[in-house]
Amino acid sequence: MSIDRLLKAQKQENQEIVNAILDDGSKPDAEYTIEHHFSSSSFDRLEKAAVDAFKAGFEVNDAEEMELEDGSVIYCFDAIAHHKLDVEMLDKACEALLVLAAKQKVDYDGWGTYFIDENGEEYIDDEEFEEKPHH
């Protein structure tokens, strides 16, 4: 699939994710931790993508090795940014990261973030959120 088609699909997904998070009651003006996901079966390619993401201004976490259901191994890392849930900013970041992924022949697997309550507390997983009292 071409980068243009991937970007169009990602932009639609960006809007849907932001709407869903905010519709769930997450704090709209908070600063969010945005984790952009990359993967590859080639550690060397993934490492080059991580260097490029770092040079582009993202925090980059250490690559992790994951075994897939079929027994094959992939490597993955996150390129991390901190900003508001702004669709335009996300679209620009996704475009740059899709181009980076294509250049290094790795997969860009979208992004994720965490729910932030009205007090500014970030919830890492649903269980933690469910255990907290709702106000």
Image: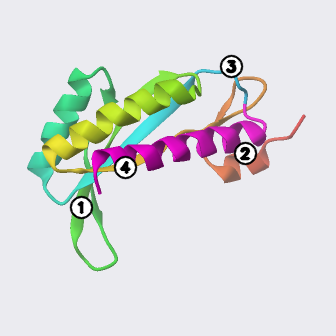
Classify 30 as above or below 24: above
Q: Earlier in the sequence, mark 1 or mark 2?
A: 1
| SS at mark 4 in the image | helix
Q: Residue at x 71, y 25 (%)?
A: 28
Q: Badge 3 is on which residue?
A: 29
Give percent across and percent down for residue 48.
Answer: 13, 38
Distance between the alpha carbons at the discs numbered 1 and 2: 30 Å
Question: Image quadrant of residue 113?
Answer: top right
Disc 1 marks which residue? 74
Classify mark 1: helix, strand or loop: strand
Label 2 vs label 3, nearer the camera: 3
Residue span colored magenta: 1-26
- The x and y percentages for residue 118 are 78, 26
Q: Is residue 124 visible?
A: no
Q: Are marks 1 and 2 in contact (CB under 8 Å)?
A: no
**How far apart are the alpha carbons under marks 2 and 4?**
32 Å
Q: Which numbered disc flags the more N-terminal residue, 2 or 4?
A: 4
Instruction: Give the distance between the C-alpha atoms of the residues marked 3 and 4, in whole angstroms.
Output: 28 Å
Identified by mark 3, the residue type is: Asp
* Label 3, residues with CA under 10 Å away: few <14, some 14-19, many ≥20: few
Which three-letter amino acid code belongs to the residue tagged 4? Leu
Read off the residue under disc 4: 6
The label shown at residue 129 is 2
Do tag 3 and tag 4 residues touch (Cβ < 8 Å)?
A: no
Q: Specify the amino acid type for callout 2.
A: Phe
